[in-house]
Image: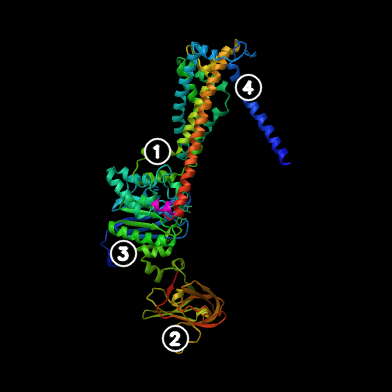
């Protein structure tokens, strides 16, 4: 009975993982394909990686994407955190309900609509489209993700910690940087990472708001795929996957190690109490 | 111990009796509302410099709210709070010469114990060497030196409480607000810390405002106590006065154990009051000067330890003597509490010190006993 249940579990886990990761695995394998034909395996080679680094178009696009993602994630994190603080802290200010409702809107709004409306806006105000319009667009839609992540952390934040700091003579701004920010930092960092990845893989909004000379990697890949998948694209995707995985693994290792340190310290503390210090 | 030397000083310390003494913390008709709820209700109170003042009262009566108004986290809805003659309205918490120890401790979780204690000193831009010395001093005071490098989550509840105390004390503020500072400590450590608090307060000449649920603690440490109920102050007096001369049934009942008998004032003469308590107590004679008119409803209040218990009727007919049957006996180690049932069905409590090791008591269940007390043992209360 028990065995059969676990056999069932193993199968479902295997299917689930396969469903999620088989396409990615195939992509990684074929990036090392000798052949130009994507579907035929002709032996191991790293030549597509070499040729990738001479493909100026792809490299430029990657560089644009990275800059857009860094800039927009950072700006969105700052603005989103401020919005979250305003929503959680300043009680009932005029227009609060509208503001908090509207912050959720981009979550459910189709990308096409966000992209189109931003395009219309940029055209209307006659803002030269290109790199900066993509950055602005990405800030706009990733800001609300940051705000929501930070808001949920702030709503469980113990206000008396800030009061204690004020009470000890620390002015409000310094209190924010010395007490509040360090304590909500995990949420802020998570918000930043979310904004970064959202910007990294956005195709639709970037396509609407871009102009001449600013092509992001997803746009480049998409346009090339229409002409046929080349192994170079597999290679660049593999590199992207590699970067993302390293980030995720590093983040989980850091939290894991912190957890271990905490448990060890707690044991020591318990031992100290037992020894009657 | 230094507490001995303090005795004479504390004995003569009574600025509240001196009309010329300037108030230090003053609440003037302070009301605090949260929406419709009145947390503090038109309260006036004066606390003097160097006083150790305790707030007592049931949960939710507004003690913390009162402190938060001194610390600056709440503004009074009406009335004003003055410190050293200066109106505190609009002065932000970080500019007030007060420090507060929070009921929830509010230790900074991302800082070590040391850094927590040093936090306030750093805000004052104190030189590094001085900060270290002060932190060391505070850690010694609360007996946490070996824990200096720990984070708050690595401490027990009582240890956290001591860190919170050390942190609020570190700046040696003019006014220290302690919201249940010792509640999580065991009895022995609590008594030690109480003495050290009093020592420190005397030595540094600070003014302490303390909230506690432990009456004994309030009695031990405080110069004066205030009994609160529903945002109002019922009585402010020295611990002995509150215990021996409560001004109302509420205070009498709140502090310690008390017997209350309902009656009617029948006569008043020469500093004495006669109270007719009907079947329960008969005629009770009390030595007390009071305003009430004859015919008024009143209550006779007497502490259990002031009633003597005997198996025989007093030889000469004494004043204040009633009889009943032992209904229940509670053994508390040092004393036993006898619950005596009176003819009308009410019970009176009387405590008897256990002077012998004998487990078999002379007076036991269902015995008929006589309860007597002198004229000056109890008080008559009219509200
Ligand atoms: N911010 C607030 N909003 C609404 N009501 C509040 C607020 N703060 C306190 N109260 C109410 O005011 C009353 C007094 O609260 P306070 O914290 O002063 O009680 P307390 O005497 O300190 O009680 P305890 O002994 O349990 O700590 C309580 O009934 C509480 O519910
Ligand atoms: Mg309280």
Whether residue B371 sits left or right of residue B70 in the image: it is: right
The picture places residue B299, in percent across and down from the top left corner, at 47, 73
Circle 2 packing at 10 Å, graded few (<14), some (14-19), many (20+), is few
Q: Name the residue: 57% across, 26% down.
A: A109
- The image position of residue B130, as x and y in percent, is 27, 46
Give the number of the mark in front: 1 or 2.
Answer: 1
Question: How far is disc 3 from disc 1 in space, using C-alphas?
Answer: 44 Å
Q: Are marks 4 and 1 on the same chain?
A: yes
- Spatial CA span between label 4 and label 1: 45 Å
Q: Against A18, is B145 above or below?
A: below
Q: Which residue is mark 4?
A: A23
Question: Does the residue tagged 4 have its C-beta within 8 Å of any atom of ligand 1?
Answer: no
Q: Quadrant of residue B241?
A: bottom left
For residue B293, which quarter of the picture? bottom left
Residue extending furthest toward the left: B20
Element type where label 1 sits in the image = helix
**Distance in Å between CA atoms under marks 2 and 3:** 46 Å
Residue identifier under label 1: A176
| Magenta span of residues | B158-164
User: Which residue was labeled with disc 2?
Assistant: B318
- From the image, which quarter does the N terminus of chain B lie in? bottom left
- Is residue A32 within the magenta segment? no
Q: Earlier in the sequence, mark 2 or mark 3?
A: 3
- Residue carrying label 3: B1
Chain of the residue displaying label 4: A
* Depth order, front residue of B276/B360: B360
Q: Are marks 2 and 3 in contact (CB under 8 Å)?
A: no
């Amino acid at each position: 009975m028990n065995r059969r249940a676990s056999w069932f579990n193993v199968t479902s886990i295997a299917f689930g993982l396969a469903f999620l990761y088989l396409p990615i695995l195939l992509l990684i394998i074929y990036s090392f394909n000798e052949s130009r034909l994507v579907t035929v395996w002709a032996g191991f080679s790293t030549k597509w990686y070499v040729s990738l680094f001479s493909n100026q178009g792809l490299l430029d696009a990657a560089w644009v994407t990275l800059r857009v993602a860094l800039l927009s994630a950072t700006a969105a994190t700052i603005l989103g955190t401020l919005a979250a603080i305003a929503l959680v802290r300043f009680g009932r200010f005029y227009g609060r309900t509208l503001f908090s409702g509207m912050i959720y809107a981009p979550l459910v709004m189709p990308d096409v609509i966000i992209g189109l409306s931003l395009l219309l806006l940029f055209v209307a105000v006659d803002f030269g489209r290109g790199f900066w319009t993509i950055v602005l667009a990405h800030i706009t839609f990733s800001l609300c993700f940051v705000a929501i992540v930070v808001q949920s952390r702030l709503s469980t934040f113990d206000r008396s910690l800030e009061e204690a700091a004020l009470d000890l003579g620390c002015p409000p701004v310094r209190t924010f940087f010395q007490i509040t920010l360090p304590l909500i930092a995990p949420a802020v960092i998570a918000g930043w990472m979310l904004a970064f990845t959202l910007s990294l893989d956005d195709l639709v909004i970037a396509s609407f708001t871009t102009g001449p000379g600013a092509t992001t990697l997803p746009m480049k890949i998409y346009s090339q795929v229409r002409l046929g998948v080349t192994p170079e694209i597999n290679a660049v995707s593999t590199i992207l996957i590699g970067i993302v995985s390293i980030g995720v693994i590093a983040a989980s290792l850091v939290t894991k190690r912190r957890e271990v340190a905490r448990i060890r310290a707690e044991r020591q503390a318990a031992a100290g109490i037992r020894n009657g210090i | 111990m230094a507490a001995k030397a303090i005795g004479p000083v504390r004995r003569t310390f009574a600025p509240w009796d001196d009309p010329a003494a300037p108030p230090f913390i003053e609440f003037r008709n302070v009301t605090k509302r949260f929406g419709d709820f009145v947390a503090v209700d038109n309260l006036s109170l004066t606390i003097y410099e160097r006083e150790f003042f305790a707030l007592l009262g049931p949960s939710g009566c507004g003690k913390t709210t009162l402190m938060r108004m001194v610390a600056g986290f709440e503004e009074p809805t009406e009335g004003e709070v003055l410190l050293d003659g200066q109106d505190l309205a609009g002065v932000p918490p970080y500019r007030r010469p007060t420090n507060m120890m929070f009921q929830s401790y509010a230790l900074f979780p991302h800082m070590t114990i040391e850094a927590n204690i040093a936090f306030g000193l750093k805000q004052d831009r104190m030189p590094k060497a001085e900060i270290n010395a002060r932190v060391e001093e505070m850690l010694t005071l609360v007996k946490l030196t070996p824990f200096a490098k720990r984070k708050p989550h690595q401490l027990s509840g009582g240890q956290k409480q001591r860190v919170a105390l050390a942190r609020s004390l570190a700046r040696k503020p003019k006014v220290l607000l302690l919201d249940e500072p010792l509640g999580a400590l065991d009895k022995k450590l609590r008594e030690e810390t109480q003495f050290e608090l009093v020592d420190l307060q005397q030595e540094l000449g600070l003014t302490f405002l303390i909230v506690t649920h432990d009456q004994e603690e309030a009695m031990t440490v405080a110069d004066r106590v205030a009994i609160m109920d529903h945002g109002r102050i019922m009585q402010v007096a020295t611990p002995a006065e509150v215990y021996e001369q409560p001004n109302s049934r509420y205070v009498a009942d709140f502090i310690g154990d008390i017997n209350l008998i309902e009656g009617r004032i029948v006569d008043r003469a020469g500093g004495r009051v006669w109270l007719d308590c009907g079947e329960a107590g008969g005629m009770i004679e009390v030595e007390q000067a009071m305003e009430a008119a004859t015919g008024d409803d009143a209550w006779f209040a007497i502490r259990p330890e002031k009633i003597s218990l005997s198996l025989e009727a007093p030889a000469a007919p004494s004043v204040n003597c009633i009889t009943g049957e032992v209904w229940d006996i509670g053994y508390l180690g040092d004393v036993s509490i006898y619950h005596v049932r009176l003819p009308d069905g009410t019970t009176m409590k009387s405590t008897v010190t256990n002077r012998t090791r004998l487990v078999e008591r002379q007076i036991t269940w269902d015995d008929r006993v006589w309860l007597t007390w002198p004229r000056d043992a109890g008080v008559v209360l009219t509200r």
